[in-house]
Image (cartoon, rainbow, N blue to C red):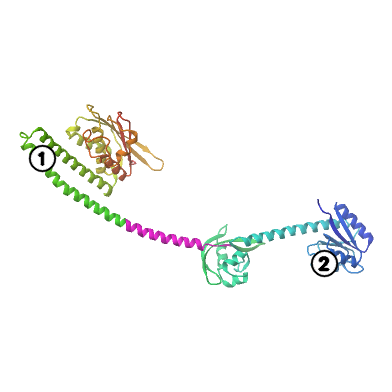
Amino acid sequence: MTPPLRMLLIDDNRSDRALVLRELQREFDLLEVKEITSSGELNRAIAAGSFDAVVTDFQLRWATGLDVLEMVKQRYPGCPVVMFTNTGTEEVAVEAMKLGLDDYILKEPNRYIRVPIAVRNALERRETQQRAALLEIRLQGLLNQVKIGIFRSNAEGALIEANRAFLELLGVQSLADADALNWFDLRDSYKQLMRLPPPQQQEQEVSLQKRNGNPFWALLTTTLNTVEEVSVVDGLLEDISDRKQAEVNLQQLNATLETRVQARTAELQAANRDLEEFAYSISHDLGAPLRAIQGYAQILLEDLSETLDANSAATLQRIVANVQHLNALITDLLTYSRLKRTEIHLKPVDLSSVLADVVAQLGSDPQQQQAQVHVDEPLPTVRANRLMLTQVVLNLLVNAVKFVAEGVQPQVRVWAEERVGAEEGSTVRLYVEDNGIGIASDRQQQIFSPFTRLHGEAEYPGTGVGLAIVRKGVERMGGQVGVESQPGQGSRFWVELPGVRP
């Protein structure tokens, strides 16, 4: 429920009081008016304080309107006071306004109606001022709660205002202490902001010092604004010492890690060199006795073939075959090892030329002469290493010819297709399709690992390294390899390499 408006009406003229009271009652629905006609009544009313506004005459028998105004404003500064008189002067009006008078109205027959309007306007102004003051209190409280320093300075670099956090960051008690500290050249900052295009704002990380001498890092944001047609610098100051220390720690950690990586890389390179030397040493040391074993076994087969029984001859044949297998395994391992370490250079390579060389090599092997190899010409150009690509294609064709069912003539088809990507550029996919025994889906990824064999040595001889050489070679050239196959339905191997734009 809205409370009534309580008013003091101070006038020793009964007729004037009646006229003013009538106008007030017309304007305000809920109204309580206490009429004051003596100094005692006024003193008691002011002491009680149960009123919201005051309307007073200037010339009273016991005092003047200025005395009444001063008494009210001393006790209740926010209380609206309206003076309604016919005896005042311009000097009186000016003095009354200085003391906080809300309105001054001359007593004339047509001006009684202005009294309630003046009272309402004064009440609305008081309410607006109270809301503004409350908002200011809340805003100041909020600014004091945040941990970011907020300040404002003028064009000369002097601080105008700041929140508590700003003073705490600098370790000072007042704006004067902060100015005396010379913590930052705000005057120069103002000049720099003036030279910037809108929005005139700067953000920088600065090293500052508190009043006690302790340094700290801060993020300083300054903005040029205009307040009541005066240019000012509004700023934010945030302590980022923890973040800067974290950055230093991270840099030190990165440097330590980089040192460790370099040391580990050097160790790995040394180990690789030792491994390469060991591989060549093993190849050389094993190669000589293997050749001797193979030579002596061959001599025995040739010189004693007529005197050896069937079991002895078969044993010598197995010795020769195993020596050949071991020799092929050493060769393949060395090839695989070189593919992992050898520096390669890529350049445009004509696939048709590579296929021609590979097919010619196949034709020179009596065991592979019965195979039919069809190449869909023309084949495009790829970006690759020719020797490495030749080894890859040769291994794929050898596998395609070898892994066929007994009594089936090997048939191989080779073709290629160009693929164009939006960002990665064009690629070329080379397909090698055979009519072989096929590969189960759960084994198709394993076959590209070294020493993976899906069949026995007697059934399909080999070292188990050929497809590993294919995968490693293609990866070194920046490509991919894969297979599509079903058991009993042949296989389709593919190699995808970067294409060459015309």
Of circles 1 and 2, the one toward us is 1
Residue 344 visible in the picture? no
Magenta span has 262?
yes
Instruction: Give the CA separation, mark 1 to mark 2.
Output: 134 Å
Residue at 44% x, 59% y: name it: 250
Residue at 22% x, 43% y: name it: 332
User: Residue 492's image quarter?
Assistant: top left
Amino acid type for the residue under numbered disc 1: Ala
Residue 139 at x, y = what percent? Answer: 66, 59
Residue 480 visible in the picture? yes
Which residue is identified by label 2? 96
Residue 214 at x, y = what percent? Answer: 52, 70
Q: Is residue 246 above or below residue 470?
A: below
Q: Which mark is residue 297?
A: 1
Q: Is residue 142 above or below residue 62?
A: above
Which of the two discs, 1 and 2, labels the residue nearer the N terminus?
Answer: 2
Dominant secondary-structure state across the stretch colored magenta: helix
Magenta span has 292?
no
Residues in magenta, as a range: 236-264
Q: Are marks 1 and 2 in contact (CB under 8 Å)?
A: no
Q: Is residue 388 above or below residue 31?
A: above
User: Residue 259's image quarter?
Assistant: bottom left
Residue 312 at x, y = what percent? Answer: 10, 36
279 and 13: which is toward the camera = 279
